Amino acid sequence: MLRLYDTRRRATVPFRPRADEITLYVCGVTPYDTTHLGHARTFLMFDVLVRLLEARGRCVRYAQNVTDIDESILQRASRDGVGWRALGQREERAFLRDMKALGWRRPDVIPHATREIGEIHQIISLLEKRGAAYRLPRGMYFSVERARGYGELSGLSVARMAKILAGQDDVGLEDTGRRDPRDFALWRFVESGPTWPSPWGRGRPGWHVECSAMALHHLGERIDLHGGGGDLIYPHHENEIAQTETATGKRPFVGTWMHVGPMKLGGRKMSKSDGNMVFVRDALERTSPEGLRLYLMDIHYRRPFEHDERRLARAEGRAERLRLQLGSGSGTIGSDRASRSVMSLLDADLDTPGALRALEVAARQDPDARTRASLLAIARVLGVMR
């Protein structure tokens, strides 16, 4: 049985979806710069998870959003002297090219925040009716006091939350009259940049409500899996839970929360804001897509990953050896001992490093044709073989 680490429960638990169709929502890109290895690692981990579920005959509805309106995009567009929409579209196209090159199983739906304004209004209206949203001069705000179990996902102290909030890109837009400094914007009244009409006045949506609207619209009021980078736990995912469960009255909003550890370069988190990035397109100039996938899966997804060019080079060699040992052809995952060993590691909270090593050991042992075909099918689940 597949077991996954649930951030909210702080435990590895059996994965038990609510229905035959498994629902997965992954927080996607804010397209203002090109895809770096941290993005790729996060999205490839969910790619493997979806492939694993589908290889076992499960139906998965997978949504991954594009945050195409955000203060980060507006700031970058202003800095570069380009239109914010043109910037977002250009970088989104680059992202999709990068992920296609890596053999990404494209999500079933890729919603965009700017196309969900009506759904965003619906959530805010519901929250207002429930007494959980209030108006201030600079926007409509959610009252965290009205959210049951606020802070349960992150487990952070109020002081730690305040420190994180002080470093957010939109901190300069916050209304100082908030009832609680953790209260967050649902709809901002702004004097510059793109705006849309709303029942409360022209403005644009807050970051957190965008994902709630998209998840509700495309997957429903309760979903099986939700994930993204670990840096999204607070405030983004904490606030998603608060506003969604308050709006729908249904709890829990998400069955299992999965978060991928940071990709680091020189001891610092790889990030657009800091500019310390290794881009996917550059890495693919010196390694194959299969080698890069193997490299990014060679550290457990919940652990931080320090980029190392020597390990990347070794990963290319490992991928090439698998190609030579397993060959080509078709097949399905079998019940032989070697295949069971590899699959049991994937079932153990998506232990891709362990599964890769078990796969390599089994491939070196010159398995019979049926076992080799099974191992090849597993390698394709991992995406280290095409």
Image (cartoon, helix red, strand yellow):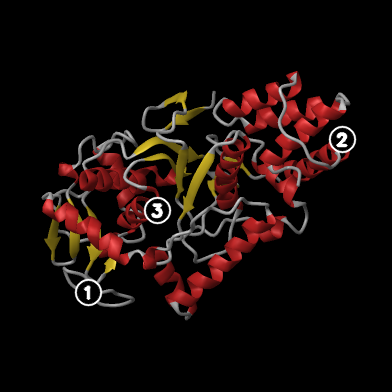
Q: Nearer the viewer, mark 3 or mark 2?
A: 3
Q: Quadrant of residue 159?
A: top left
Image coordinates of residue 114 in percent, x first then y, are 37, 68
* Residue 226 relative to residue 53: left or right: left
195 lies above or below 294: below
* Residue 163 relative to residue 263: left or right: left
Q: Tell me, yes or no, if residue 318 can be seen here.
A: yes
Q: Residue at x 34, y 51 (%)?
A: 216
Q: Quadrant of residue 320?
A: top right
For disc 1, the marked residue is 202
Image coordinates of residue 137 in percent, x first then y, are 14, 67
Where disc 2 sits, the SS reads helix
Image coordinates of residue 328 in percent, x first then y, are 84, 42
Image coordinates of residue 271 in percent, x first then y, are 52, 54
Quarter of the picture containing the N terminus is: top right
The residue lying toward the viewer, choosing from 207 and 200, is: 200
Question: Disc 1 and disc 3: Cα gap in Å?
Answer: 26 Å
For disc 2, the marked residue is 325
Question: Disc 1 and disc 2: Cα gap in Å?
Answer: 61 Å
Query: Are there few (<14), some (14-19), or many (20+) residues within 10 Å of tag 1?
Result: some
